[in-house]
Image (cartoon, rainbow, N blue to C red):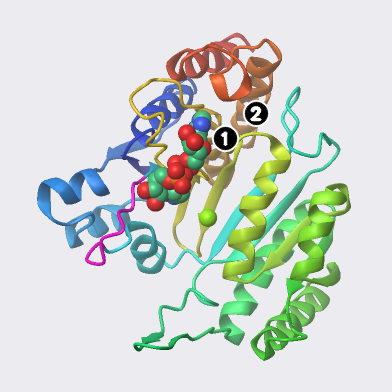
Amino acid sequence: MRVAVVEGDGIGKEVIPAAVEVLDVFGLPIEKVPLELGYGKWEKCGVAIDDDDLDVLKSCDCVLFGAITTPADPNYKSVLLTIRKELDMYANIRPIKPLPGVTGVTGKSDFDFVIVRENTEGMYSSIEEIHDDVAYTKRVVSRKGSERIAKSACKLAKERRNDLMIVHKSNVLKSDTLFLDVCRETARSEGVDHRDMLVDAMAYSLMTYPERYDVVVTTNLFGDILSDMSAALVGSLGLAPSANIGDKYAFFEPVHGSGPDIAGKGIANPIAAILSMKMMLEWMGYQKEADLVEEAVGKSILEKITTPDLGGDASTIEVGRAIANYIKDM
Ligand code: NAI
Ligand code: MG
């Protein structure tokens, strides 16, 4: 396996080395290909990602990614959108699962669900018209796009508790009627138990009864918002991992951004990056190693080797090293 390792900007440069230190403990046959992308590269070269970078990414099986700074400059082309599109990674997967000893805004810890967000169309179609007094964004929902995300969600549901929740706003948006219909048809033909809910009711329900859900599938914008909101159930942005998966390539990254307010201080929580690396191990088929990573992460929190966001005083490097050492001792 070849993995492109993109640290990116800000705390990406701190959390990815910690994740790589943990990965290296296993001595797996994984070739790491370092690649510089993002704002730092843009400042130096005037581009954040170029065709050569895309060739390198395509020569790899997957990407382990930190975070990049996105300036408000209209000439700046989003690296993440470019990569998602070029590598056609249509499923954004966000597991929402509490870690031992940490609770989020609700104080609950009895939930374990996954948000599967369609990643290529919907409100983020980039089909827009801007005039002086009015602006339009075209929301695109295709049968093909809905079918493949529904299949990804059903596959996950079958590996988990066989319970799919389809989230939409079909009472107002006709495009969501298509999404809902295709998800229902797919779940039926895959033999997956399914329900559906309007997105506004779902936002309330996820915060109130998160334990009721297993796999939640939804369109791009709704998934973006619900998944960031759900990260609050877990306790810190520094704990939330994610994956972007297509038929050919996959991309693993912490949910958080480049953390400019804490960058360079060595205090960023590396756990989101380490759990993203864990998702990469699972995707590669190294389930045993992935389970060890999760166990070691839990141990580091219970033994209070944590960064300041979790109330501790350990550094990014110390947390990563402790997790690596637990695995060595297991
Ligand atoms: P952010 O996620 O970088 O930071 C939000 C808050 O959470 C900050 O107070 C930060 O210190 C804290 N935080 C984030 N990660 C943490 C960690 N691992 N440990 C401890 N605390 C952590 O989001 P923000 O400030 O909105 O964006 C900063 C930059 O990152 C922007 O340029 C934005 O465009 C970019 N960004 C990039 C993403 C990506 O590469 N996927 C995702 C989100 C934002
Ligand atoms: Mg987001």
Magenta span covers which residues?
A: 68-76
Secondary structure that dominates the magenta span: loop
Q: Give the camera-side residue of 82 and 62.
A: 82
- Neighbor class of circle 1 (other Cα within 10 Å; few <14, some 14-19, many 20+) is many
Label 1 to label 2, Cα distance in Å?
7 Å
- Quadrant position of residue 166: bottom right
The answer to whether one can see residue 256 in this image is yes
Amino acid type, residue under disc 2 in the picture: Glu
Which of the two residues, 200 or 234, is positioned nearer the viewer here? Answer: 200
Q: Quadrant of residue 287?
A: top right
Picture coordinates of residue 59, whole percent (x, y): 29, 54
Asked if residue 147 lies in the magenta stretch, the reply is no
User: Residue 31: where, in percent of width, then height?
Assistant: 34, 36
In the picture of the structure, the residue carrying the numbered disc 2 is 294
x and y percent of residue 36 in the render?
24, 43
Disc 1 residue type (three-letter)? Leu
Using the rendered view, name the quadrant where residue 289 is placed: top right
Question: 234 left or right of 138?
Answer: right
Give the class, few, some or many, for how many residues have Cα within 10 Å of label 2's Cα (few <14, many ≥20): some
What residue is shown with label 1?
A: 275
In the displayed structure, 48 sits above or below 109; it is below
| Contact (Cβ within 8 Å) of mark 1 with mark 2 | yes
Name which residue lies at 79% across and 63% down.
Answer: 202
Looking at the image, is 302 positioned above or below residue 269? above
Q: Is residue 64 visible?
A: no
